[in-house]
Amino acid sequence: MIETLSSIWAVLPITVFIGFILDQLIGDPRSWPHPVVGIGKGISILESKLNLGPPEIRRRNGVLLTILIVGGSYLFTWGAISLANIVHPILGVVFSAYLIFTTLAGKSLLDAGQNVLIPLLKRDLSEARTQLSWLVSRDTTNLSEGEIVRGTVETLAENFVDGILSPLFYAALGGAPLAMAFKAVSTLDSMVGYRNDRYEEFGWFSARTDDWANYLPARLSVPIILLAGRLRGMPVNHAYQMWKRDASGHPSPNGGNPESVVAGLLGIRLGGINIYHGKPHHRAEMGDVLHPVNATDIVHCRQLVQTATWLSLIPTLFVAYIVTTYIAI
């Protein structure tokens, strides 16, 4: 195992770079095999067997679920790369890069934003609501144009961390196995990390693990997004003030960092009232209203996220180089 890990570390910058470029070029072809599908099926099977009994049992079983899925994803990925390396070291590099590529969502995130933007520009609010419903858990049935834009911008901002920066960060630290372990954490949170009767106890540890895993990347996202804003000619000083004022008010310990900065750079206010299962919930406001929210904000947000994504590659490759130089020796 040590020899396999050393081989993974030795080619970290190469595999991270190739995986990143593949994501930018290809995105997420639905016809291609995807490890996250397997992770999701594993979660579903174990959830049906473990999410039973009184609250204290389900709470304990939730910890077991997280350990099994995250640990299993890491070990399975490591084993697959080991077999590829046995066949040929180049195959190991290619397979590692491919697996890192599957953990990234850079192009697909921008495409999702575009899918909402296109009907908005055509004044087809019904289709825009439908497209947004694929991205958020809130009720989109009666959203106005401004609320559709707000939901899209919030999704782009928060998922810059979850779908781009965090998997890149963990790929740089531990290659495809660690990136896949993070993807397992993220998938667990999206499937069982809810505060409702079914998952309040069972999913608590999965949700907390996701918070811990994204803690550092979420804070690294602030200077990266601010720099992207500077390159885009946006009001960086205002955005920094919005981050200091509003980030801590977000219900997530991490989500307020990218969202408050993006709100400040765009000059809009995020947060407010969202409808979940017919009930209104107030989400802390982020940013000040410098202009009315409109579809152009999605355009600017996509450009901002795209620039921030490419900027993220620089520190990621630097970390990968450090790991390769000082750990893989």
Image (cartoon, helix red, strand yellow):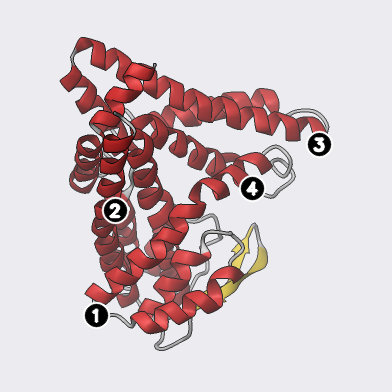
Q: Amino acid at mark 4?
A: Tyr
230, above or below 211, in the image? below
- Residues at circles 3 and 2 in contact by the CB criterion of under 8 Å: no
Q: Disc 3 designates what residue?
A: 55
Instruction: Please identify, in this view, whether the residue under mark 3 or under mark 2 is nearer the observer.
Output: 2
Q: Using the image, tell me which numbered label, if any, was put on residue 194.
A: 4
The structure residue drawn at horizontal position 50% and vertical position 70%, both measured from the top left corner, is: 143
Q: Residue furthest bottom?
A: 290
Q: Disc 1 designates what residue?
A: 233
308, above or below 28, in the image? below
Mark 1–mark 2 distance (CA, rounded to whole Å): 22 Å
**151 or 160: nearer the viewer:** 160
- Residues at circles 3 and 4 in contact by the CB criterion of under 8 Å: no
First in sequence, mark 1 or 4: give its number.
Answer: 4
Mark 3–mark 2 distance (CA, rounded to whole Å): 43 Å
Q: SS of the residue at dot 1? A: loop
Q: Using the image, tell me which numbered label, if any, was put on residue 44.
A: none
Q: SS of the residue at dot 2? A: helix
Q: SS of the residue at dot 3? A: helix
Mark 4–mark 2 distance (CA, rounded to whole Å): 33 Å
First in sequence, mark 1 or 2: give its number.
Answer: 1
First in sequence, mark 1 or 3: give its number.
Answer: 3
| Mark 3 burial class by Cα count in 10 Å: few <14, some 14-19, many 20+ | some
Q: Disc 2 designates what residue?
A: 315
Q: Amino acid at mark 3?
A: Pro
Mark 1–mark 3 distance (CA, rounded to whole Å): 52 Å
Mark 1–mark 4 distance (CA, rounded to whole Å): 38 Å
The structure residue drawn at horizontal position 22% and vertical position 73%, both measured from the top left corner, is: 231
Q: Amino acid at mark 1?
A: Gly
